[in-house]
Amino acid sequence: MSHLFRVTLLLMGLAAARPLCAQAWDATKHASGWAFQEADGSFLFFDPATQTLRTWVKGSGLLSSLQVSLPAEKKPSVAAASAAAPVSGGVSDYSAAAATLYGIPRRQRVPTVGEKTSPQEAPAPNPTAPERWVLDSYNRVWMVCQSRLVVIGKEGSPVNLLPLPAPVEDMAVARDGIVLLYRTLKPYLEKRDLRAGTVLWTYGDKTQMKDAAAEPMKVPHNRMALGPDDTIYIAEGAGMALTVLDPVKGPKDPGQLFFITPQPVASRAVLGPGGRGPLLSWAGRDVIFGVFTPKQVQSCGGPNSKGLVLARFDLAGGAMEWLPTSLEPGHRLVGLLDTEAVFLAPDGGLTYAPIH
């Protein structure tokens, strides 16, 4: 029985009681936030308006819905809030490096003469909305929510809550575990088992966790994707090579994968204030796609494009090529189909770009 069919059977019954609500939701118009893509091409979206997970496939539409009960908002203690507040006049190594990479946050700049300060520049996001989610082989959903790893059971209720040491940037599910890449300056990654979420092994410098939790970075600096055999590929900073981790051995004997192009290519892009875009594996193929803005890859021999540029990494052949798109920066890569890359539009909904 295919995984898609199994998930559909599970969730269709739960959706039957809400047929009108299910039919009204369309990913091409309503999708937002993170998206988890199965190997069969189906997507798992979260609908914040109804606190519902939606299983959707292009061409077939909405397959099922599951309303979930998220844990109550975790309110920080006064001591924790004081510890997280920046110390006047003091700059940590972490914040100094982040300022070099991305500029000094507005809240830390000294206002110049005539500059108006605002107590709130944008509405705060819903604190209880999940940030990331994946579906494991036991039909449980693992969510990153409120600095916790929340495991949602088949009925839509939490069955486990685990604290997380820092904000999570990328999340993936392997055959035997959950892989978390944290939002840090240098890559730090955990692999956890599927039974209880216990950490099996880690990769990278864990001393970053305290600073990353107290002073979260504004944009991603490192990205991760899993290959067809669950090999872990990490793109570090502006580098165009990939760090390779065995799914079982983990940090033992990590490798480096370098790529060649028809024309000489620089070893680093120029990320700038936008940070690094997503890194996604193409199901059933030894290919990974990354996404960049045109300005980021000018130093790498990228094409003269007005839209986003996809980097196609051939893992087996060690070659890379550029695929320009017509999509403006602000679109976010969320999935890969047989002939198309799937992007989330800035205002919600989906759009597509051809790939090969």
Image (tube, rainbow, N blue to C red):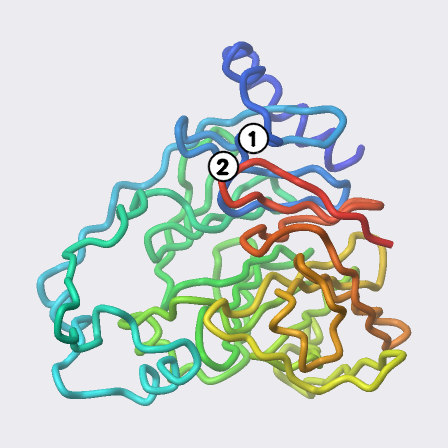
Residue 284, horizontal then vertical, whole percent = 84, 53
Depicted 325 relative to depicted 164: above or below: above
The residue closer to the viewer here, 76 or 195, is 76
Q: Residue at x 62, y 26 (%)?
A: 10
Residue reaching furthest left?
78
- In this figure, which residue is indicated by the disc labeled 1? 54
Residue 266, horizontal then vertical, whole percent = 72, 86
Q: Quadrant of residue 278?
A: bottom right
Residue type, label 2: Phe
Q: Quadrant of the C terminus?
A: bottom right
Please report contact status of discs 2 and 1: CB closer than 8 Å, yes or no.
Answer: yes
Q: Residue at x 56, y 30 (%)?
A: 54
Judged left or right of residue 317, residue 280 is left
- In this figure, which residue is indicated by the disc labeled 2? 46
Q: Residue at x 82, y 69 (%)?
A: 321
Depicted 180 relative to depicted 21: above or below: below
Q: Residue at x 47, y 32 (%)?
A: 47
